[in-house]
Image (spheres, rainbow, N blue to C red):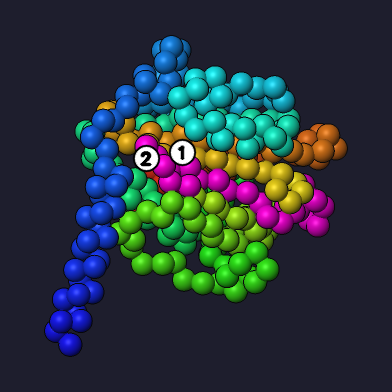
Amino acid sequence: MRFAFFLINFILLFQVFTDKRTFAQTDYRSFDDIFPNLQAQVKEAAFSNEGYMKSVKNSSYNSLAGSSGKLDSRIFSSIQQLKPAHYIESVTVIPGNPGQYTLLKAYNVLRKVRTLKGRLYPSHSRKENVPLFEDVTRIESAQKNNSVADPPFAVRIPSEETIFLRVKDINFGNSYYRADLYRDKQGIRYSLTNNKSITYFLIPVMKEESLIIQLYFEPIKEGILIYGLSGAAASDFVSSKADIPSAISKRLAVIVNWVKDGIQDKL
């Protein structure tokens, strides 16, 4: 019995050690390495508490990720395939020492989806801060909507992972998403897509897989980078009746701040 207990602990420790060696970063890129020749005001905003965010109505928009060539090209290309009418881009840096904020910490925040519940945003129509997502839970699969518990703390990051979410949205009611996570040597790419149509009072607003929110996390010399890029394909009729860029901006901002607070242990 003692030997079995010792063996299990040895295997767990070995996995942690192997994971750290496999993905350890001794050479951190700087912010300027990733975004060379960036306008000074954009960089200044990225390092501020609010971060940088830009909303663009342009189907041929060339994002910072697409133009710099220093980030995973799939961040931009996967959204570009939608040919969205709107792009929302954000850049946020949590200042700190190299290695102070780890990818493992970011990963563990992303998998604790229930902590996204109740996150506030300023509602202009209600003139107060209200919870954007009234409930958030993992579900079993795209076909089975049974709630499942958030997993325990992870000691390693998988190379790929997919989870399914049910979100009770203050505007759109129950909405369903697929979250895909991809790990590489420098960072984590997190892709959130609606895997069912999003409706407003039974009226379809965005068809299945017509909304993509991409997040990218990378420890850098100045702390940790959180880059976001979102795109949505909505009909002209829907766009004329609803402020789609505002709706996406709010959701991207809430999600970025949720992960930011989690990385900084504010949750």
Mark 2 is surrounded, within 10 Å at the Cα level, by few (under 14), some (14 to 19) or many (20 or more) other residues, namely: few
Q: Is residue 16 rendered to the left or right of residue 94?
A: left
Give the x, y percent position of residue 252. 54, 41
Residue at horizontal 37%, vertical 48%? 106
The quarter of the displayed image where residue 54 is located: top right
The quarter of the displayed image where residue 3 is located: bottom left
Give the x, y percent position of residue 12. 25, 66
Residue at horizontal 61%, vertical 27%? 55
Inspect this view and state whether residue 105 appears.
Answer: no
Inspect this view and state whether residue 54 appears.
Answer: yes
Q: Circle 2 sits in a helix, a strand or a loop, which is it?
A: loop
The quarter of the displayed image where residue 82 is located: top right
Q: Is residue 141 rendered to the left or right of residue 235?
A: left
Give the quarter of the figure containing the C terminus.
bottom left
Main SS, magenta residues: strand
Residue found at the far bottom of this picture: 1
Q: Is residue 63 above or below residue 95?
A: above
Residue at horizontal 78%, vertical 36%? 239
Foreground pick, 236 / 214: 214
- Could you tell me the amino acid type at mark 2? Lys
Q: Is residue 155 rendered to the left or right of residue 215?
A: left
Q: Is residue 106 rendered to the left or right of residue 230?
A: left
- Could you tell me the amino acid type at mark 1? Tyr
- Mark identifier at residue 38: none
Q: Is residue 249 above or below residue 62?
A: below
The residue singled out by tag 2 in the image is 185
Foreground pick, 9 / 209: 9
Mark 1 is surrounded, within 10 Å at the Cα level, by few (under 14), some (14 to 19) or many (20 or more) other residues, namely: many
Residue interval drawn in magenta:
182-205
The residue singled out by tag 1 in the image is 216
Give the x, y percent position of residue 159. 43, 51
